[in-house]
Image (spheres, coloured by chain):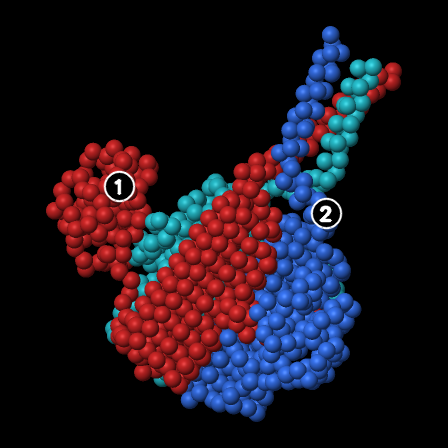
Chain colours: A blue, B red, C cyan
Amino acid sequence: MIESPINLRLGQLAKLANGKIKGDDQIVICGVAPFDQAGPTDIALAAEAKFLNRVEECQAGALIVPEACQVKVGNLLLVQNPRAAFAKVMAHYYPARQSQNSISNTASFGDDVSMGKRVEIGDFVSIGNHVKLGDRVILGPGVVLGDHVVIGDDTTIAANVVIGTHCRLGCRGLIQAGTVIGCDGFGFAQEEGRHLKIAQTGNVLIGDDVEIGANNTIDRGTFGSTRIGNGVKTDNLVHIAHNVVVGDHTLLIAQVGISGSVTIGKHTILAGQVGVVPHISIGDRVMVGPQSGVGKSIADNQVFTGSPAMPHRLFLKVAHILQRLPDLRKRILRLEKKLKEIGEQKRR
Amino acid sequence: MIESPINLRLGQLAKLANGKIKGDDQIVICGVAPFDQAGPTDIALAAEAKFLNRVEECQAGALIVPEACQVKVGNLLLVQNPRAAFAKVMAHYYPARQSQNSISNTASFGDDVSMGKRVEIGDFVSIGNHVKLGDRVILGPGVVLGDHVVIGDDTTIAANVVIGTHCRLGCRGLIQAGTVIGCDGFGFAQEEGRHLKIAQTGNVLIGDDVEIGANNTIDRGTFGSTRIGNGVKTDNLVHIAHNVVVGDHTLLIAQVGISGSVTIGKHTILAGQVGVVPHISIGDRVMVGPQSGVGKSIADNQVFTGSPAMPHRLFLKVAHILQRLPDLRKRILRLEKKLKEIGEQKRR
Amino acid sequence: MIESPINLRLGQLAKLANGKIKGDDQIVICGVAPFDQAGPTDIALAAEAKFLNRVEECQAGALIVPEACQVKVGNLLLVQNPRAAFAKVMAHYYPARQSQNSISNTASFGDDVSMGKRVEIGDFVSIGNHVKLGDRVILGPGVVLGDHVVIGDDTTIAANVVIGTHCRLGCRGLIQAGTVIGCDGFGFAQEEGRHLKIAQTGNVLIGDDVEIGANNTIDRGTFGSTRIGNGVKTDNLVHIAHNVVVGDHTLLIAQVGISGSVTIGKHTILAGQVGVVPHISIGDRVMVGPQSGVGKSIADNQVFTGSPAMPHRLFLKVAHILQRLPDLRKRILRLEKKLKEIGEQKRR
């Protein structure tokens, strides 16, 4: 869709990706394409056996391959981490949208708004009072920023995002369209069957290099902050409740829901549609499988799946047996019948 | 709520719905109402036995009934497909909102925006550069269209929808409020525990006669397109990841989540809250039950349910036994006890 | 984050919360803080044993405690319902945002819009024709109201909320950002594999004292109304389909999805990610556990969990056994082996 105006020789790409060349390092590469669609001026990725075994079929001008691969043909960019090299090459050919250094005359500004250099403000943006925008911040059309919001350098807020009062975002972030940050958490006290609202006085603090997907909801803290660490990435339609802490470089896949006051460690992954009950903690480098329901705290380095979640290896066994329950039931019936026969034989 | 200004004789409705009349074909019908609330100038639907058995109680001026029904009383519109006839009659009395052929003076236009006839543009709409709108397109208030967006004839985009750059929508579509089309997919490469963004260079292609519910998220392709076929309907809060292909006339019910690079066939139905793992395919005319977790590809014409999903008939058996697990466990204990007794008797 | 400008003596707080004082009723309280962070001018909550046992460590100027507690030290506000007292004290120190009695000159008004006293209308609000706003209504930036919308006194609609034509909201409500009320329900009739839209002619009726979370979707009725009772609270990303009825003071936690024509009673709680199939009813004072799939109607006063949902006590047993299925399977194998041995011994 998007064509890159950038051409580089393969040798230059090797520097960018910290790799070595086998073949012609002078070939000009004009873009990146998928393995099966790449042409003679494209570079493609062949990280896995299913592609490495079919290198002869590939029309790409060059291939990013693992250092240790046995491929003998074509122009190769050999790297330790092919996917990371691919990401770097992609970023070079298709750089993220840069600030247009333009402020729409339809935007609305509160009092005491400070802005860094080369900020871009889209149509119909509404900015509250005492707001601080870093250098090269981009606010897409329809963005709403409450009072006292702070946004770090090089962060992009996509269209129609709402960021509530007192929330603070770090640098180099991307908040995708339709997301709400700093809504009130679900806090009520019951009295005679009615639910009295507990004022939500805190905020949301988001670190550096964070990407939040589209139509997420991140509640402010009841007191203090809901905290999203550095390098965290969330997919679409993720819900993060009040006072949750998400550790650095943790991934939350689409439609994950995290209840209030949950603490999640670093480098952890919650797969799609996972739910987490309130007030528990999930450790560092944990993986939780899709649709799991996490009802108890999980220690570091664990892999859990299921609803309720259990160790992943156990889950695999349980899931295997689950589908064989009708057979197990029949076998129990057969055992009962046989034992009854034995009992009757004795009585005779 | 909405009153129809349209009156028709029952005979005219029969032509519209391709049906036959029993009773008075000259009776004037002024609206459509539910079976239990319809009055003498309304037509109502009685498709199922629970209504057909109570026709005497119904106050409706006329009833849409199946051809083969045994009803002897009242004014009847007999049709092969009562629900389809009902939809057509409803569409006649309560037509979709028509373009007002008006462009709000608060809307913002980029360069090179082309518009067809009788377009309606609401308040605070932000349109990028090189955008193409077909005839009778309606853009609700707060809609944001990125550069190079194309929208076909007679498509309505409801309030606060965001459509990213290069996305293309077909004709006669409806995108409900708050939906985001063309957000970046969740694509990262890991390097030393950090997640490097993989540029998302593709777009979203949506066919004709598509309805997308409210607050959906549809990611653009990493390369190439995320594709939504003709006649597809999605409910609210549905997530469709990058490079997913949804076949023609497939239904995705509320809160379904589809991971990246999944292919779904035609005339398939995924029920509410279903999740699908990446890189698998689901065939044509498949039905997947609510809350299922689809972890493996499913062939055409299958019915699957469960998390992990299994054939629906097996699921029904498993779900039945599941609730009887405490009993099964007791029976195993009893068997063990008896066998032990038998063993002890022998030893004596 | 937010500092309260309000100071009260402990004795005055006792009146507010209908409690008694032990200790110094003249101490000045300037704010509310969590137990572990409170300082000498704060009041904190100590409702549960885990806090009551650590009262000596707490630096708070005063504590809200249960009447029956045995605490002997510090300044205590003794109440029957500590959480409710806490909510009242919080509401006093951190009152909800009041209307600024200001109308943005960027807002757009249709014909025949009537407004009560001290209304606040934010930037880029788009209001349709024949709309009625009560006293002290607040519309945040980017809110879109369709024709014939009615909003009761003291209701706040947060940024970028969309409310469709003919929907009516009660008094003292809060609709959080990004929510869509009155979108079309998912109603189609199948004809030769195509899905004909059934016009959605109804509306949404929302009672008094209702809070709807962020990025919810609430469909209008096909005919008649989708009804949300008084005192209902929904968390974020909740989906409520057409013609659903939610009884008074019911709670819907994050990511709950309710299918069309479901009736839910009063004082009921659906936990996070629960799904409910169409056309069933859930009684009063029911509790449904997280991630449950409700496939059948539930009577009053029941506690259900699981997918498919079952009585909660049964679910606990089943979940316990589920994780022991590999063991049960081994025991069945062992039984089969032993019985086979017995059979062989006999044959000898």
Q: Residue at x 67, y 40 (%)?
A: A321
Secondary structure category for the residue under label 2: helix
**Alpha carbon of mark 2 to alpha carbon of mark 1: how far?**
54 Å
Image quarter where the C terminus of chain A lies is top right
Residue A306 in view (yes/no): yes
Disc 1 chain ID:
B
Q: Residue at x 17, y 39 (%)?
A: B22
Is residue B85 rendered to the left or right of residue A114?
left
Identify which amino acid the numbered label 2 is placed on.
Answer: Leu
Task: Relative to A55, say whether A138 is above or below.
Answer: below
Residue occupied by mark 1: B65
Is residue C86 rendered to the left or right of residue A229?
left
Are dots 2 and 1 in contact, CB under 8 Å?
Answer: no
Q: Nearer the viewer, residue C60 or B45?
A: B45
Q: Residue at x 72, y 47 (%)?
A: A314
Secondary structure category for the residue under label 1: strand
State the image quarter where residue A247 is shown.
bottom right
State the image quarter where residue B332 is shown.
top right
Q: Position of residue C76 (x, y in %)?
A: 65, 63
Q: Position of residue C115 (x, y in %)?
A: 31, 73
Q: How many marks?
A: 2
Q: Position of residue A212 (x, y in %)?
A: 58, 71
Q: Position of residue C294 (x, y in %)?
A: 51, 45
Residue occupied by mark 2: A314
